Image: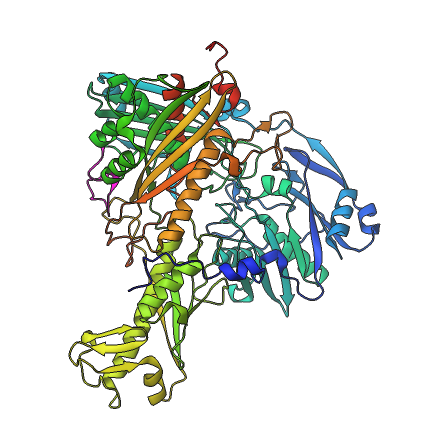
Amino acid sequence: MTAVGTPVTRVDGPAKVTGAARYSAEITPPGTVHLAIVGATIASGRVTAADTAAALAAEGVLAVLTHRNLPKIAAQPPLLPSLVGRAAPGETFFPMQDDAVHYAGQPVALVVAESYEQAHHAASLVRLSYETAPPVATIERGRDQAYEADRLFGGLMPGRNERGDVDAALVGAEVRIDAAYQMAANHHNALEAPSTVAVWEEGQLTLYESTMGIRATQQTVAELLGLPIADVRVITHFVGGGFGSKAMVWPHTTLTAIAARHVGRPVKLMLTRPQAFASTGHREEQEQRIVLGAAADGRLTAIRHEKLSITSPFDDWAEPATGVSAQLYACDDYLGVHSLIKGNTMTPTFTRGPGETLGVYVLETAMDELAQATGTDPVELRLRNRAPADPNGNPWSSDGLAECLRLGAERFGWARRDPEPRTTRDGDWLIGTGMAAAAYPIAFFMPPQRARARILADGSATVQTSTQEFGTGVLTMATQVGADALGVPLRDVRFEAGDTDLPNSSAAVGSAGAGMVGSAVHAAGTALREQLVALAVADPGSPLHGVGAGSVTVAGGRLTSSERPGAADGYSDLLARNHMSDAEATGTWRPPPLDTPHGLLTFGAQFAEVAVDPRLGLVRVRRLAGAFAPGRVLNPLLARSQLMGGMLWGTSQALLEGNRMDPRYGRWTANNLAEYLVPVNADAPDVTVDFVEVDDAVVGPLGAKGVGEIGQVGVAAAIANAVFHATGRRIRTLPMTPEAVMDPADGE
């Protein structure tokens, strides 16, 4: 029996529930002092004066830094992920390098004091004067300044995706669906606030950082401070959630290091909840429009998909919304275009299911309209249009969409559905059901991944790589993979991570964590096992001496050979005979190239049942069912948890989460959890998760495609389609607030 594929509980669970797990803000080196950041209260303009006298005189204050006395950064890092963007060719942006203010909340002063309370009190005493300019903070304010993006998503993807002649195909279409959508901004709201502890010792910097990418943090901070990479060490043992907000290297990390060097003491920064709203990115406010052309039987002939969103003054950043709409369905004529408005906001960033949670929402609600217009069952319409290959004719690395649609429909009871809207009631509630296909691109934009495996003389094993645990269960998954690769019991494996002194592992974004970490661990464990097998067959004292290495298998730390039944050797005995206290090997996994000749999507299907009170505008999600084909499921317990979490967040995105900028001041109207709505237990419906396991030899040696994003994709569309089925009304805004849902004309 292998460890991979079994529902192993979290190996870090006991440490977390007993409080032994140490998060970044809980690290307090001797002599630690505290940093408070003063954020700009304007969104556009410049600082004209900074009166720091009262703050400097406050008890416990060690330093107050502004743009006038903060050291300049050494260089702009050419690395991703990094949000030190370019305002213009040759010009860089980093806070407090000059008097310019680009967005509300931008750091304009730093206060270092002996205690957290003293630092924040002194920060309130800093008096800043500004020269203000009218901000551009909303799409409406900047619509006339929109431009088509050449590259987006940190430069990783093109802004335009085109094939065929969309205009001609739409003219000739027998059926057309043309729909426009508006979506409010979303925030991550991880439980753990972004935190940094910076410690300098003999010119070398150690950062205890709340991050999803310690290697990216190391490289970016080293570049900004002009240090050799070897002089920066980043440690992150546990992260209290990230959802994309901790994937980028935000300015506050480097500012903390600068402050620590200035005062000559370890410095700790813990952002407040309101600061996190303005300092660690968000899912941008956006508008999307989609036009579908189809034959009378619902087969697609054309898709035009356009997105308009706000980015910062210094970055061309947008979530890519057309990656799925360009591939999911067979369609010869396609156009996807992203347009941007440079506004007075912090650069948006990855937010769970980046781009495709909303791109698929738009596509799949339009597909529901097409089903209604052509009299086709929504599940059948997806099956009818399913693409057998990607747009270039490349086969999918693995598929499973049709199986997900059919399994999800069966589990949900879709066949019992009355397709006519507004026909089912439960007292005052209108009942509706809806569905959506789901897909998410597989990301391969990371460098080679490395891990190290070590067997000790007592037969126990240690596996190491510099990933970080941010709630997904990667430590558990990697321990399982390491146990199988080495052929030792799970209980004998210890997994070490979260330190840049360990072998390289990239930021875990885009659902890539399981694939990249697991593949590197598999490579290291396999290399060490083969090394020890070679040692055994060459060892005259081994019962396996002289057998073919290919005949040897390892299980439970015991080596056996099909060529010599009954003979066995053990790792402990083998090392002892050869006077070795341990053995180790490093393994490297190189991701497939970006131009790999395969279509790369993870597939799924989402189903929802809602109850709607049209007079009050209330929507209650009663049931969610999802079926997913994520390749090999390494740990069904962890995977189910990830998918369920994504589905619940999709519910929140559909009905609750949304933030807006005050157009006058360029500030978020909600900056705390009292005003920014997120679901609680009472909002959670019954959730069913099913797996369709598919073999995938392209994505890595384990065949795992990842589950972090796909669970959220399609949920908002399924809920919106269910609301239509219940009420007969299309709502094209997210979130679907009560005022949007309520129907004053409904007198029933």
Q: Which residues are magenta?
A: 386-401
Question: In terms of image quadrants, where is residue 529?
Answer: bottom left
- Using the image, determine if residue 222 lies above or below residue 501: above
Position of residue 544 measured from the top left corner of the image (x, y, whole percent): 22, 83
Front in this rendered view, residue 138 or 178: 178
Residue 679 is at least partly visible in this image: no
Q: Is 626 positioned to the left or the right of 252 in the image?
A: left
Q: Is 136 positioned to the left or the right of 70 in the image?
A: left
In this picture the colour scheme is rainbow
- Using the image, determine if residue 125 lies above or below residue 487: above
Front in this rendered view, residue 354 or 658: 658
Front in this rendered view, residue 104 or 315: 104
Question: In terms of image quadrants, where is residue 115?
Answer: bottom right
- Using the image, determine if residue 238 lies above or below residue 612: below
Please report the residue visible at 24 percent of the width from the left and 18 percent of the height from the top.
374
Position of residue 147 measured from the top left corner of the image (x, y, whole percent): 45, 29
In this view, the residue farthest toward the left is 563
Q: Is 519 a magenta residue?
A: no
Residue 9 is at least partly visible in this image: yes
Q: How many marks?
A: 0
Question: In terms of image quadrants, where is residue 678?
Answer: top right
Please report the residue visible at 40 percent of the width from the left and 81 percent of the height from the top.
458
- Using the image, determine if residue 579 lies above or below residue 267: below
Q: Is 394 a magenta residue?
A: yes
Please report the residue visible at 53 percent of the width from the left and 62 percent of the height from the top.
15
Quadrant, the N terminus: bottom left
Position of residue 659 measured from the top left corner of the image (x, y, whole percent): 55, 31
Front in this rendered view, residue 504 or 385: 385
Q: Is 396 positioned to the left or the right of 472 in the image?
A: left
Q: What is the chief secondary structure element of the magenta stretch? A: loop
Position of residue 692 measured from the top left corner of the image (x, y, whole percent): 27, 45
